[in-house]
């Protein structure tokens, strides 16, 4: 861990809100991203992210070292589970035509054409739909490792499980997402399209 | 047409392929997988597609932060975060159930609570008191006082045994040993039953809470 992060954590544990907010600034993007991927809508993700940082501040004294990011994302994962328990319909809210699910806010980049931007935005939405169809444990695993680039060890810590569990959940999630993506191949960039029909199951 | 066995084995390789993409595979597993890839075109193709899927997912931009989550003031200390609280409760309930069960088993094994199996030592001790010389009693007393420490202090049987010989003599003089035994053993049986019921109830509660948490995460 970086020295300045250790210092910020120590100061947070001493009750300094300014120091804790520096940590919030550093990790709020990742916390919100994980919550959004798990819960699927902006309002719920905001609630989970808010609860994450409130809880983290209250319990920062219990952080004993290791990856602070994993510790924080563990709190996020738990906050998402709490929200899912209290509102079970979110787990089954996977309607493709659901107009209430806002499109993920994606900004256009300077290098892409308007058509490319539209395709990229739609692909992001299609991936989110695919994530919503996964069991929540698989959804969490693939988000942590493939979208937020955590290592297996960090992901295991964030999910409160072991490496073997991360491995199997990730494998199943990737396979399911691949099958899902193949249903809308026109959204995929050319290098990622299905090449061999013999691979179909 | 692939047989069921072939399909099952093919899925078995799927987990290894996924771990292989991330270099999260042991040396032995890598050797086995690479040997398999050399003779299985289907798995080789799937490995390529898996790499492509992972690369695509990694390219996806992070959802845009809708607002800042900086804390404007230090939050009030909460009683408990619900998620952490549930796990604590489950562990506390399970531990209490285990302790209650251990008390019952220990008390039964040491013969403090009279039962068909465990009451023999106590019965033999009483016979010694009524028939033989006082010599066996000092031997029995420390054991019974130890059991008294471990078990409920309300147990009259144990309390009698852990004291000096005077109460024993009183027993002989006033009540018949049989009458004292019956009321005391009935009380002990009730206590044993209560402890067992408590252990079962808490064990069932812990199991329910654990299953409930697993069900939500499935």
Image: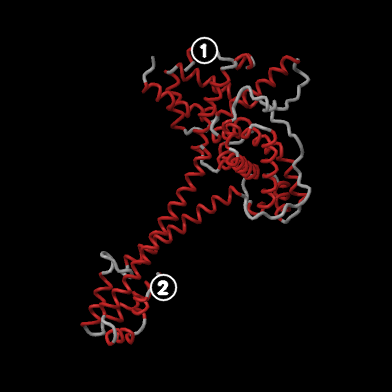
Tag 1–tag 2 contact (CB < 8 Å):
no
- For residue A137, above or below residue A6: above
Say which of B155 and A160 sits in front.
B155
Would you place residue B170 above or below residue B45 in this image?
below
User: Which residue carries the number 1 mark?
Assistant: A196
Q: Which mark is residue A87?
A: none
* Coordinates of residue B215 in the picture (x, y in percent): 50, 40
Q: In the rendered image, which quarter contains the N terminus of chain A? A: top right
The residue identified by callout 2 is B149
The x and y percentages for residue B70 are 76, 44
Label 1, label 2: how many angstroms apart (C-alpha)?
75 Å
Q: Nearer the viewer, residue A67 or A30?
A: A30
| Badge 1 element | loop
Write down the quadrant of residue A78 in the picture.
Answer: top right
Mark nearest the camera among 1 and 2 is 2
Q: Position of residue A38 (x, y in %)?
A: 61, 34
Q: Chain of mark 1?
A: A
Q: Residue at x 69, y 30 (%)?
A: B62
Q: Looking at the picture, tell me which residue is in the foreground, B33 or A167.
A: A167
């Amino acid at each position: 861990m970086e020295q300045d992060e250790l210092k910020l954590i120590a100061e947070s544990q001493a009750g300094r809100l300014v120091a804790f907010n520096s940590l919030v600034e550093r990790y709020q993007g990742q916390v919100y991203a994980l919550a959004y991927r798990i819960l699927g809508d902006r309002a719920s993700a905001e609630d989970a992210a808010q609860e994450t940082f409130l809880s983290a501040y209250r319990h920062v004294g219990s952080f004993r070292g290791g990856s602070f990011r994993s510790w924080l994302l563990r709190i996020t994962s738990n906050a998402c589970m709490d929200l899912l328990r209290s509102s079970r319909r979110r787990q089954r809210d996977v309607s493709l035509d659901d107009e209430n699910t806002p499109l993920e806010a994606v900004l256009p980049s300077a290098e892409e054409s308007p058509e490319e931007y539209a395709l990229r935005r739609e692909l992001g939405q299609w991936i989110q739909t695919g994530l919503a169809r996964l069991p929540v444990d698989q959804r969490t695993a693939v988000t942590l490792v493939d979208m937020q680039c955590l290592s297996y060890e960090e992901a295991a810590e964030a999910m409160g499980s072991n490496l073997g569990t991360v491995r199997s959940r990730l494998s199943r999630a990737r396979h399911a997402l691949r099958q899902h993506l193949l249903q809308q191949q026109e959204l995929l960039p050319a290098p990622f399209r299905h090449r061999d029909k013999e691979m179909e199951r | 047409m692939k047989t069921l066995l072939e399909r099952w084995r093919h899925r078995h390789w799927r987990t290894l392929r996924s771990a292989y993409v991330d270099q999260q595979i042991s040396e032995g597993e890598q050797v086995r997988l690479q040997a398999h890839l050399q003779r299985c075109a289907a798995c080789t193709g799937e490995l390529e597609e898996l790499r492509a899927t992972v690369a695509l997912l990694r390219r996806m931009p992070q959802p845009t932060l809708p607002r800042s989550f900086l804390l404007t003031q230090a939050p009030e200390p909460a009683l408990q975060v619900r998620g952490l609280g549930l796990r604590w409760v489950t562990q506390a309930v399970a531990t209490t159930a285990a302790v209650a069960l251990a008390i019952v088993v220990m008390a039964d094994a040491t013969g403090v609570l009279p039962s068909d199996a465990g009451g023999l030592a106590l019965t033999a001790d009483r016979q010694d008191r009524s028939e033989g010389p006082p010599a066996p009693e000092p031997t029995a007393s420390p054991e019974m006082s130890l059991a008294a420490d471990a078990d409920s202090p309300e147990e009259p049987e144990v309390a009698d045994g852990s004291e000096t010989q005077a109460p024993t003599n009183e027993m002989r003089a006033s009540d018949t040993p049989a009458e004292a035994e019956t009321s005391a053993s009935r009380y002990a049986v009730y206590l044993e039953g209560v402890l067992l019921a408590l252990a079962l109830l808490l064990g069932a509660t812990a199991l329910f809470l654990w299953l409930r948490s697993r069900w939500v995460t499935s």
